[in-house]
């Protein structure tokens, strides 16, 4: 009955014209406390009764635990909604950023797939569907995850952290995935412990809607964890804080909310959700649906602006622009695996040598699906930014003047590794500068997502 009722309401909601898309998602991760199982079920059913379809991002071990506990009712309730993936084990060390920080680009892709792939397959088996999205535990993010996730068939990266993002605080394409990530002021939620804060959350939501309507549309998201509705502290903070690694028999349950406190949390949450769903011009969508509401083709570009700065040009990534300059068919390619170095001493390149370098770059991209770190000019090298800027400025006649590339694209990546990875579960001094360096190299793939509205 719930399924039929929800379908009818969802059909009516989906037909409404929208200026703003709203995503509601739950990191469903606590596989220690059975009360969190019940919370997931209550949230899934309560939202379905309201005609609201959320995205439940579920940890692989959580799905297996639900199966072992024979909580088919919880699985069925969440299956009324969109299903995403939230890592294999979440907080058990090493977490994704921890192990990825010991790897470079190519081997990191393989390591992410090795560690996180099995959980994804379990999710498919238990829920009978391909998860629509992925989001990291805490802020345990690494750019090597993007190619690995593409191989797994995932196209959407949905979470909230600060490692990379656009000034617009709106979704973007990066690493070949649609990122609903780092939305900052457009990530709005209400407090669950203070009834006086609900009005404030509603006002923040209304202000976000108003701002996005002025811009011509956009995305707002809200996220919670089912465990928040039944516990006063996070389950993983109790067990894995600052790199702790207890034996499974030493795991502790988080402190529970009282029945009254839990009831209040649900009430405040639903009051906020009811406000969202009644707001004109707002359409509630899932991670699976948002992918159908963006243009996936790269924007057309000449690439000539790369001579001035290596940056986004409108809706075109720096990689899109470079492929255009190389007269290659538009396609997605990764950024370089490492930072190249220019060893060329001259300020001019002979035409025939530069044309050979262009052909070599095209062949490398075609074969490897990523940009080269450098190109060869005889026995010397030209780093990728310098090659791109030189190519963009080339007049196509006579000797080629060397132009140094200005890497403005890297400004969208965080600089403070300690702050970017300050999750309480990470070791206290964890500051993986290597991950932010790889993120900068992959910023060649960054471009805004173009939303479509009815």
Image: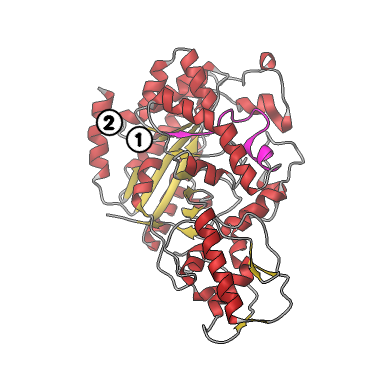
What residue is shown at x 53% (from left), y 32% (from top)? 117
x then y, percent, for residue 186: 48, 50
Q: Which residue is mark 2?
A: 6
| Of the image marks 2 and 1, the number of the one nearer the N terminus | 2
Q: Is residue 2 above or below residue 268?
A: above
Q: Which residue is mark 1?
A: 53
Label 2 close to label 1 by CB (< 8 Å): yes
Q: Is residue 124 above or below residue 339?
A: above
What residue is shown at x 30% (from left), y 34% (from top)? 51
What residue is shown at x 75% (from left), y 38% (from top)? 428
Bounds of the magenta segment: 83-101
Nearest the camera: 165 or 360? 360
Q: Is residue 389 above or below residue 125?
A: below
Nearest the camera: 313 or 2? 313
Nearest the camera: 107 or 255? 107
Estimate how packed mark 1 is, as few (under 14), some (14 to 19) or many (20 or more) residues with alpha carbons within 10 Å.
Answer: many
The answer to which image quadrant residue 337 occupies is bottom right
x then y, percent, for residue 420: 66, 47
What residue is shown at x 33% (from left), y 56% (from top)? 452
Question: Gap between marks 2 and 1, in whole Å?
Answer: 8 Å
Residue lying furthest bottom in this view? 398
**Is 115 left, or right, of 215 in this rendering?**
right
Q: Which mark is residue 14?
A: none
Res. 408 in view: yes
Q: Is residue 299 magenta?
A: no
Disc 1, SS: loop
């Amino acid at each position: 009955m719930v399924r039929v009722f929800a379908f009818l309401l969802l059909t009516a909601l989906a037909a409404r014209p929208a200026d703003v898309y709203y995503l509601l998602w739950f990191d469903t991760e606590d596989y220690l406390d059975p009360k969190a199982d019940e919370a997931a079920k209550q949230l899934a059913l309560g939202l379905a009764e309201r005609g609201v379809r959320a995205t439940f991002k579920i940890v692989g071990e959580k799905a297996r635990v639900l199966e072992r506990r024979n909580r088919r009712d919880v699985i069925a309730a969440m299956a009324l909604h969109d299903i995403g993936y939230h890592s294999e084990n979440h907080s058990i060390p090493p977490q994704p950023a921890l192990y990825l920080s010991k790897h470079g680009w190519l081997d990191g892709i393989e390591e992410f797939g090795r560690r996180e792939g099995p959980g994804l397959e379990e999710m498919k088996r238990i829920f009978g569907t391909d998860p629509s999205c992925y989001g990291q535990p805490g802020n345990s993010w690494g750019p090597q995850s993007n190619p690995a996730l593409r191989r797994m068939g995932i196209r959407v990266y949905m979470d909230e952290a600060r490692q990379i993002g656009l000034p617009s605080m709106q979704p973007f394409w990066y690493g070949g995935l649609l990122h609903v990530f780092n939305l900052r002021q457009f990530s709005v939620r209400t407090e669950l412990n203070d009834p006086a804060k609900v009005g404030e959350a509603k006002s923040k939501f209304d202000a976000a809607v108003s701002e996005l309507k002025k811009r011509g549309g956009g995305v707002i998201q809200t996220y919670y964890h089912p465990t928040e509705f039944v516990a006063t502290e996070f389950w993983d903070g109790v067990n894995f804080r600052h790199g702790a690694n207890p034996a499974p028999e030493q795991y502790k349950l988080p402190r529970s909310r009282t029945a009254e406190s839990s009831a209040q949390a649900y009430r405040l949450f639903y009051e906020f959700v009811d406000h969202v769903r009644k707001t004109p011009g707002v359409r509630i969508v899932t991670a699976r649906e948002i992918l159908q509401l963006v243009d996936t083709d790269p924007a057309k570009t000449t690439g000539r602006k790369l001579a001035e700065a290596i940056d986004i040009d409108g809706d075109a990534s720096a990689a899109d622009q470079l492929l255009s300059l190389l007269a290659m068919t538009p396609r997605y390619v990764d950024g370089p695996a490492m930072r190249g170095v220019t060893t060329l001493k001259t300020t001019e390149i002979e035409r025939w040598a530069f044309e050979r370098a262009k052909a070599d770059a095209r062949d490398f991209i075609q074969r490897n699906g990523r940009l080269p770190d450098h190109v060869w000019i005889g026995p010397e090298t030209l780093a990728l930014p310098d090659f791109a800027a030189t190519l963009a400025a080339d007049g196509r006649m006579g000797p080629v003047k060397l132009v140094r590339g200005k890497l403005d694209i890297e400004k969208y990546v965080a600089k403070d590794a300690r702050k970017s990875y300050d999750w309480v579960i990470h070791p206290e001094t964890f500051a993986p500068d290597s991950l932010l360096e790889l993120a900068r190299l992959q910023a060649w793939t960054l471009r805004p997502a173009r939303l479509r509205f009815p």
